[in-house]
Image (spheres, grey):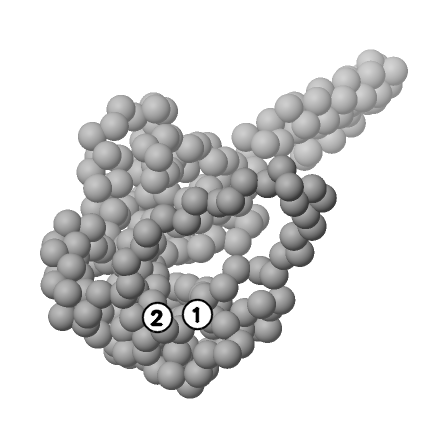
Amino acid sequence: MVVLFGLYILLRLVGLTQFAVALLSGTGVLGLIIGFAFKDIAENFLSSLLLSVQRPFKLGDIIEVEGYLGVVQKMTSRATTLVDFNGDHVQLPNATIYKNAIRNLTANPFMRSTIDIGVGYDADFDHAQSLALDIMLSHPAVLDDPAPQALVDSLGASTCNLRLYFWVNSEVNSSLKVSSVLMKRVVETFLVEDIAMPDDARERIILNPETLKKPVVPNIKKSQSNSEINTNKASSESTNDDTSSDHDEIREQAAQARDPEEGENIL
């Protein structure tokens, strides 16, 4: 601005006032055009500087921004590259990351998960809660501190809905896998203890009873004894109850993947 103002004064002194006005006007328009054209580039560059100074995450961290969840692979002056849990590369502009909420799943590996299960209104709710709590406490992947909880969450049309809260170490165990195992064990235990889990009430209207055929009811055996169920549990747990975390696998995929963007890594 000082140079342009000095050039304007010089041109006025030599009698080129109109030329000075035209020069300043053209320079201003050109500056506006360049400013609008490079707005996003400058914004991303400044955001990359601020992110590199503040460091809300580091390489290898699992973060979620704008609905994208993945492992941080690289950050350049323009964008940050994430490798999501499908193995896809996602490049997010640094300005988008800086201006939005960043959820860092690696900073605190402890993660809380929930399971919803409905029991009949004729069931003993205290007994059902106690059984569900014992199942969570007996699983090695469920943390003792914070302690798990089994609470009555809501009253449905035909069930009293329980919500189970438990914590896992996401770097060691997968919360999705642990939820799957706990749901199977809760259902098996409730069946043994004769705790009903009915579906929503429905009204059936029979228009022409004479044309209806008698439904074929399969011959379902009654509940097995506790010893047989425990044996079946032990055999199934060895094959289907894998609760290991997937974080290391995603990090290995990110390390072996091709670099989708050239540029110096600033993290």
Query: Viewed as shown, does residue 160 lie left or right of 84?
Result: right
Q: Residue furthest front?
A: 210
- 140 with respect to 186 (left or right): left
Give the number of the disc on residue 190: 2
Q: Which residue is mark 1?
A: 196
Residue at x-position 34% and y-position 67%: 191
| Residue at screen point 47% across, 36% down | 92
Split into 4 quadrants, where in the image is the N terminus?
A: top right
Residue 98 shows in this picture: yes
Residue 203, x across and y down, in percent? 66, 56
Up/down of 1 relative to 72, above or below? above
Q: Mark 1 to mark 2: distance in Å?
A: 7 Å
The quadrant in which residue 81 appears is top left
Say what amino acid the circle numbered 2 marks. Answer: Phe
Disc sitting over residue 97 in the figure: none
Is residue 35 positioned above or below 106 on the image?
above
- Name the residue nearer the viewer: 2 or 88: 88
Q: Quarter-wise, where is residue 164 in the image?
A: bottom left
- Please give left or right for residue 64 compared with residue 178 in the image: right
State the residue at coordinates (52%, 60%): 199
Residue 220, horizontal then vertical, whole percent: 32, 55
Note whether 216 is above or below 180 in the view shown. Answer: above
Q: Quadrant of the C terminus?
A: top left
Which amino acid, by three-letter code, is at mark 1? Ala
Query: Is 27 or 121 nearer to us in this picture?
Result: 121
The image shows residue 121 at horizontal and vertical percentages of 53, 76
Report x, y in % for residue 256: 20, 30
Q: Secondary structure at mark 2?
A: helix
Graded by Cα atoms within 10 Å as few (under 14), some (14 to 19) or many (20 or more), the crowding at tag 1 reads: some
